[in-house]
Amino acid sequence: MPPRAAKRKAPPTDEAPTKKANIVSPTPHHHASGTSRDEAILREFYPPEMSNERVQAYRDGDIPTPYHQLTGTLQSTELQRQNIKPNKAVAHWFRWDLRLHDNTGLHKAHEAATAGGVPLICLYVFSHEDFHAHCTSPARIDLTLRSLRILKGDLEKLDIPLWVEEVAERKHVPGTILNWCQKWGVSSVHANMEYEVDELRRDAKLVAAGVKKDISFNVHHDTCVVEPMVLRSGSEKPYAVFTPFFKKWEPYVWRNKLLDKLSPSPGKNHPDLNTRESFKELFEQTSFPVPNEGKRLSEKDAARLAKLWPAGEHEALARLQLFLEEHVAKYADRRDRPDIEGGTSSLSLHFAAGTLSARQAVRAARDHNKRLSLDAGHHGWIREICFRDFYKNILLVHPHVCMSKAYHEEYHNVVWEYNDEHFRRWTEGKTGYPIVDAGMRQLASDKFVHNRCRMIVASFLCKDLLLDWRKGERFFMEHLIDGDFASNNAGWQFCSSSGTDAQPYFRIFNPLLQSEKFDPEGHYIRKWVPELRGVRGKAIHDPYARLPASEFKKLGYPEPIVEHKFARDRALERYKTGLGKNTL
Ligand SMILES: Cc1cc2nc3c(=O)[nH]c(=O)nc-3n(C[C@H](O)[C@H](O)[C@H](O)COP(=O)(O)OP(=O)(O)OC[C@H]3O[C@@H](n4cnc5c(N)ncnc54)[C@H](O)[C@@H]3O)c2cc1C
């Protein structure tokens, strides 16, 4: 166990650096090739890896969590914010909640506007540097822009304008918003809380800065079905394991009738308010910002992905309905089968963009269930949605997971390989393990991967290649259309065995067995790995070992990058050493 930190306020070394030159390199574990574990962190935005002692200080409450900083600021300014008089408008600041229905912040903003007799106006902040700092993928940014266009159209029908404000550097976001509010006479802003560290700190600053300028910032819980931090174990602690969390979560949802209280979409701005004239410029914004180089899809990819993943809340609701009508009943049997179309809902991009709320989804599933109690399919699907809630709770209680640290910080003593060639071959889907390559090629093409294959490719990176899981985590965020920090981080930590509920380090996925079990006929592999389309029978899972050498050569498919048995033994040894389990 690391030594406990002394009871004093630790210096804020996990704050984002203001100048590049200030960043001092820690003592990274260098690899012979010159790359190091420190490269897994985006150093232009974040300080070096936090010490395990500092993690413990967060746990002990010696350092206030960003969540407590925000809630503390909200509490200490409550009276002042209440006393701010309505000016010319109330605003809702959209984030990853790009919908009208069941949007808590939007609903509260509408109520405040109605009570104050002023129009509701809306804002979205397109912050280029945040996209870089958070590794947001071009596909996700493109989906956001497409969702915003639909949202703008829907809001306009209600005489509510939506303005998209472009900000280059994220340090300017708070100032830009305050200026925007002053320009349009906004006295009150509502937004839904984002649970990542940078966002909680930004909001805490804004709430405090706002009251000094007579602007009330109000931040609401919205994204989870059950408000985070509410559910506690018998010993009054936040849950660290999913199953008991779910056991408490489910009856809590039904008992408190949480699904009967969905917020309605806002009503029309009253005609007497002359919103269209007073906020003409906001209505007339015709073009949206263009993402920076490297964050922009090619025209061809944009067109292809728009067809594959239509945006907006109407589409999300239609997709939800289709899934319930045609697939959910068989969910329990098929959710692990990447070879079956419709085995899962493919709604994660809508949850991530906020074009569908988790409450809407759980309620629709409950209402669709025809029996007295939930059947296995409906129940199993609702349980998966609960995972979102659980992982968002983890961010609030353990902010160090947002700072490139493992949930179980002792896993940081595991020494990873930093083999650039292996990493490149993994990213390109050229590992010589068909199921792994199929998963990585699905990611490259569709910017989405089936959950079972996310686990297989992640486990392969952490255990078979023994590469730093944070490199995989970042690569996923940079490519997934549904990239969500909490779920992605937790998924990676599950696979690297360092997270909550993680698979124990000695349980190592065998990619061959996974392939035979979850893609028995090899349909998924043949779909994504064209070199193997002509391979018949069980050879599809392991063509190198199961085909004659001459036949294998003709395929133009790579030999396995590592031998699984060797890799497994190496991983076990490295984990044991890192965790101090090798000593007598
Ligand atoms: C390494 C790894 C990385 C991941 N990265 C992300 C990510 O960036 N964004 C993301 O939304 N999910 C992520 N997941 C979780 C999961 O893979 C996806 O949510 C799921 O594949 C989405 O497909 P679906 O919508 O068809 O899911 P369904 O099976 O239909 O499930 C319904 C919804 O439940 C939620 N859900 C399901 N499984 C999980 C889970 N394990 N953790 C959290 N929520 C879950 C999702 O919101 C999903 O849309 C990751 C999992 C792993 C193992």
Image (cartoon, grey):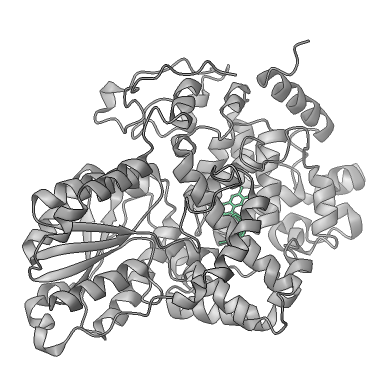
Please identify the quarter of the rendering in which residue 164 is found.
Answer: bottom left
Outermost front residue: 235
- In the image, residue 207 sits, relative to residue 306, either above or below, namely above
Please identify the quarter of the rendering in which residue 544 is found.
Answer: top right
* In-front residue for pair 507/366: 366
- Ligand 1 placement by image quarter: bottom right
Outermost bottom residue: 271
Quadrant placement of the N terminus = top right
Residue 492 position, x and y percent, is: 60, 43
260 sits to left or right of 266:
right
53 sits to left or right of 277:
right
Please identify the quarter of the rendering in which residue 150 is found.
Answer: bottom left
Residue 514 position, x and y percent, is: 80, 50
For the point 14% across and 53% down, the residue is 80
Residue 309 position, x and y percent, is: 51, 70
Residue 245 position, x and y percent, is: 61, 52
* In-front residue for pair 440/383: 383
* In-front residue for pair 577/302: 577
User: Would you say residue 297 is visible in this rendering?
Assistant: no
Quadrant placement of the C terminus = top right
Outermost top residue: 584
- Could you tell me how many numbered marks the image carries? 0
For the point 51% across and 67% down, the residue is 358
User: Would you say residue 583 is visible in this rendering?
Assistant: yes
For the point 18% across and 46% down, the residue is 208
210 sits to left or right of 488:
left
For the point 34% across and 25% down, the residue is 13
